[in-house]
Each structure stands twice: as C-alpha cells, then as structure tokens.
Image (cartoon, rainbow, N blue to C red):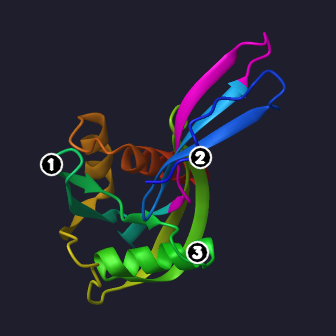
Amino acid sequence: MAGHGGQSPDAAGGPEKRELLLEAARFRVVRRWERCADGALRVRDVIEHPGSVVVVPMVSPGEVCLVEVVRVAVGMTLLELPAGTLDRVESLPTAAARELAEETGYRAGRMSAAGGFWMSPGILRERMHLFIAEDLVAGPQALEPGEQIRTRVVRWEEALTMCREGIIDDAKTVAGLLLVDACRRGAT
C-alpha cells in the first residue's frame, strides 16, 4: 500500500487532487477530492481498473456457453459469461479471444464487438467491452492457477429465462445476454 501524504487540496489546489490508497495487481484505489460547482469539496474513493472484456459464445444460433465460476468475493459459484481483465497490451478482440479460449476452450471463427458498459460507475472505473463469438471450435481450457471454472452450454431462451428469474445474477452476464438478445431481435 502506498500513500501520498493524505493531504486534501487547499482552496487554490486546482480542480482535483488524488491520493493513492492501494495498488493491487489488477486495480488501484484512489481517494479523489473534487471541487463542486457550488464550491464545496467532495471526497470520493474510486477503484481504478484497466477495463475488461466479456464474451457471448454462441455454440449454435440457439445455444450459448456459460461458465460456472467460484467467486470468493461473494462466497458462491456464479453462472456467467466468460470475461477477463485487460491486464496486458493487446487489442480488445484479441483479449476477448484469449479469455474465451482460456475459460471455455472454444476458439472463435468470428468475433464481433457488441457494445460496452460501465460496471459500477459510482465507485468503480471499469469499462467492460462486449463481444459475440461465433463459428466456435472446441479445444482445451487454459485456466490460470487457482481458477475454478466449468463450462455449461444452455439454450439461448433458457439463459434469458435464468436472467429474468434471478438464477443468473451476475451483472455483466445479465447485461450482455439482454443486450445481445435485443440486437438479435432487432436484426430479425
């Protein structure tokens, strides 16, 4: 953990001051002081994240591959779309293809960008980039040490029902599936 003295800005301190509270392998926590329009000073702790990708792997036009992931932070196994942090220098499509292969074993013949969204902008600066993977070819998973991930292929309509019924309650998965579904319905 590294700090920068914990000093708040003075009245002439400019539009924003920052203090590094924590630097972890994949994110930083920064305290930010911002001057509001009314002159008041507002303090916020923000998690700065390099961004991430999430992939909707279409095994067939009517089936999607989800992953069951053990999530220590919530103490549960969640049903999710494959996803990962942008933690190396690579293009977004390359990152999406890498995460797809690592978590599911599938390689995509076609990878299409499908939008993006902020994960939790009140506290977290993480932009998630959504991709659709099609023309999949099966292969072995390449899990990172300690990852506990199992694949689960489900019918598209079943995945949407699981979102509506709260069986799938991971935000990126709900957003990704519903966004892609809206696009698919608009295209027909």
Which residue is tagged 2? 4
Q: Where residue 183 sits: x, y (%)?
A: 56, 50
| Residue lying at the far left of the rendered structure | 76
Which quadrant holds the N terminus? bottom left
Q: Secondary structure at mark 2?
A: loop
- The residue nearer to you, when weighing 10 against 148, is 10
- The residue nearer to you, when weighing 49 against 153, is 49
**Magenta stretch contains residue 124:** no
| CB within 8 Å, label 3 to label 1 | no
Q: Secondary structure at mark 3?
A: helix
Q: Please tell me the numbered disc located at residue 15.
A: none
Task: Report if residue 60 is visible in the image.
Answer: no
Whole-angstrom CA distance, mark 2 to mark 3, is 36 Å
Residue sitting at x 40%, y 64%: 83
**Residue 31 placement, left or right of 33:** left
Whole-angstrom CA distance, mark 1 to mark 2, is 36 Å
The part of the image, by quadrant, that contains residue 59 is bottom left
| CB within 8 Å, label 1 to label 2 | no
Label 2 vs 3, first from the N-terminus: 2
**Is 6 drawn above or below residue 114 in the view shown?**
above
Which residue is tagged 3? 93
- The residue nearer to you, when weighing 124 against 93, is 124
Q: Where residue 132 sits: x, y (%)?
A: 50, 66
Q: Where residue 185 sits: x, y (%)?
A: 52, 48
| Residue lying at the far top of the rendered structure | 38
Residue sitting at x 51%, y 61%: 52
Specify the amino acid type for callout 2: His
Label 1 vs 2, first from the N-terminus: 2
- Residues packed near mark 2 inside 10 Å, few (<14), some (14 to 19) or many (20 plus): few
* Range shown magenta: 35-52
The part of the image, by quadrant, that contains residue 139 is bottom left
